[in-house]
Image (cartoon, rainbow, N blue to C red):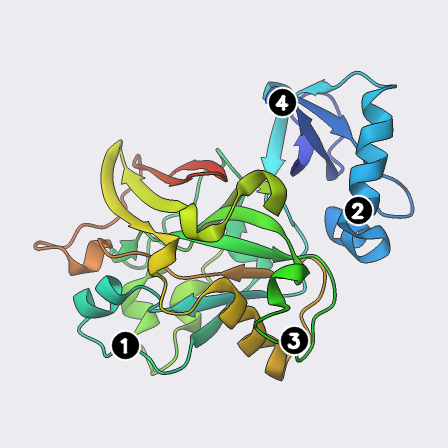
Amino acid sequence: MKLVSYTESQGGDSQARYGVVVGDDAILDLTTAEAPTLRMALSAEGLGGIAARAEVLAQQAQGIPLASVLLLPPIPDPDKILCVGLNYILHAKEANMEVPAHPSIFVRFGSSVVGHDNPVSHPGISEQFDFEAELAVVIGRRAYRVSEEDAMGYVAGYSCLAENSIRDWQRHSNQATPGKNFMGSGAFGPWLVTPDEAGPVESMIVTGRLNGDEMQSDSAANMIFSVSQIISYLSTFTELLPGDVISTGTPSGVGFSRKPPLYLRPGDVFEVDISGVGLLRNPVA
């Protein structure tokens, strides 16, 4: 099952809605007054309840053409976006940093990401706007102090995240928050894919392309900290809520490590392509 959040691209209705993708080219609208966002639906009825409603609706309603809507981040209103730094060995090496003993965690704000095919915003104030392709994990139910063995049972699904960074602002101090949170600098989408459709994380290949050229590619099996380890670690100090987003780190090949460095410029197009999950594409404005 693929779940999207969207607004109508034509007409006067600008309300954010959500639905299930059918046949790869249509959306069945699942929005209700009781659960007006996908995050609220996950909290109120869980993935099972959403799937049951989608199955009934598929027998009764005609879908909205996918091409007629503007896609938002799958979770437009997350309580938290938690990101993992240095989670691939080769990326740690290219950054000249030691492989961490514990996950390196920082946060992103919801306003720092846009949806599929929406332009990401070059910050203007810096030329060091770097690309980062990452696998995103969306939490499906409340998780606090969960074990690694149980952690995957809390996953609602997966998505693509362009966890783009403004490198000089990231290094203003020993924490990365300013360089990770410029308005609209990252992207998230195109949809949330449930685990049964996405397949095992270890089989996913995370690829980043700049203007059609492959910059990054690695197997998610090569993450230093697995999804289950990350969820368990995060849930030790904070309660993970339905709709919370975890970005799991980027493979090697980012722009700052290249000689000469290669950064995003207005007019560029960056894609995050993850097998089993989808392709997120964003121009740079």
Q: Is residue 8 above or below residue 81?
A: above
**Circle 1: residue type:** Val
Residue 192's spot in the image, x, y percent?
A: 60, 43
Upstream in sequence: badge 4 or badge 2: 2
Gap in angstroms between the C-alphas marked 4 and 3: 37 Å
Disc 3: which residue: 146
Gap in angstroms between the C-alphas marked 4 and 1: 42 Å
Q: Nearer the viewer, mark 4 or mark 1?
A: 1
Upstream in sequence: badge 2 or badge 3: 2
Q: Residues within 10 Å of mark 1 (few under 14, many from 20)?
A: some
Upstream in sequence: badge 4 or badge 3: 4
Gap in angstroms between the C-alphas marked 2 and 3: 21 Å
Q: Please give the name of the residue rendered at 29% of the width and 59% of the height, measured from the top-left corner.
A: 126
Q: Which mark is residue 66?
A: 4
* Most distant residue in the left direction: 259
Disc 1: which residue: 99
Upstream in sequence: badge 2 or badge 1: 2
Upstream in sequence: badge 4 or badge 1: 4
Secondary structure of residue under mark 4? helix
Q: Please give the name of the residue rendered at 68% of the width and 64% of the height, measured from the top-left corner.
A: 79
Secondary structure of residue under mark 1? loop
Disc 2: which residue: 48
Q: Nearer the viewer, residue 54 or 118?
A: 54
Q: Which mark is residue 157?
A: none
* Most distant residue in the right direction: 34
Residue 160's spot in the image, x, y percent?
A: 48, 46
Q: Is residue 102 above or below residue 4?
A: below
